[in-house]
Amino acid sequence: MDLSVVPDITMRGQDDPHARVIAVRPATLGQLAARVRDLAGRPGEWWGLVRFDPAGPVHVPLDGETWLTTWPPGPGGTIRAQVGTLIAGELAEAVLTARGVTERPLRANRVRVHGGGTPALTNPGPAFAVSLHAAAARPSGLPPR
């Protein structure tokens, strides 16, 4: 059984009882998934930032680790997210299998943890789609993903 994509819920930030300075670690997949789920439940905080552009996806940063994306109907693109959720509309994720590439629909109100690689998303529906995504912030000095 491959457990490499299971969110690590045991890595929650803990204070050092000896008041030592500890290194700030990037958020775990479980923490990112919880953040996306919580944001999805509070649309009043970000819905006003949604922008629709028929020319292509629009990515709107919410903080250093989360952003929302609007997707026009048709081909989408890749997204460098570790977790995401569909808020409105339709999205499908292209998945590489032993038989080739297949599309797997994203379900609204479900947080999807992306395994390795960069997911490719398309909007097969007739209307715009809105999604929320998160990826752990990279420590300063490291190249972007």
Image: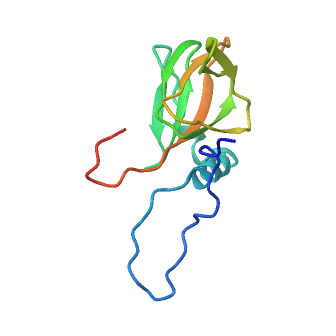
Depth check: 66 or 70 in front? 66
The spot of residue 68 in percent (x, y) is: 54, 37
Could you tell me if residue 19 is visible in this image? yes
The spot of residue 53 in percent (x, y) is: 49, 19
Q: Describe residue 87's horizontal placement relative to residue 16 as left or right.
A: right
Depth check: 65 or 8 in front? 8
143 relative to 122, above or below: below
Q: At x 29% / y 54%, what residue is drawn?
A: 140
Q: At x 49% / y 44%, what residue is drawn?
A: 135
42 relative to 115, above or below: below
Q: At x 58% / y 36%, what residue is drawn?
A: 114
Q: Describe residue 145's horizontal placement relative to residue 126 as left or right.
A: left
Q: Quadrant of residue 48?
A: top right
Depth check: 28 or 48 in front? 28
Q: At x 44% / y 62%, what residue is drawn?
A: 25
Q: Quadrant of the C terminus?
A: top left
Q: Residue furthest left?
A: 141
The spot of residue 100 in percent (x, y) is: 60, 11
Q: Residue furthest front?
A: 1
Could you tell me if residue 63 is visible in this image? no
The spot of residue 125 in percent (x, y) is: 68, 13
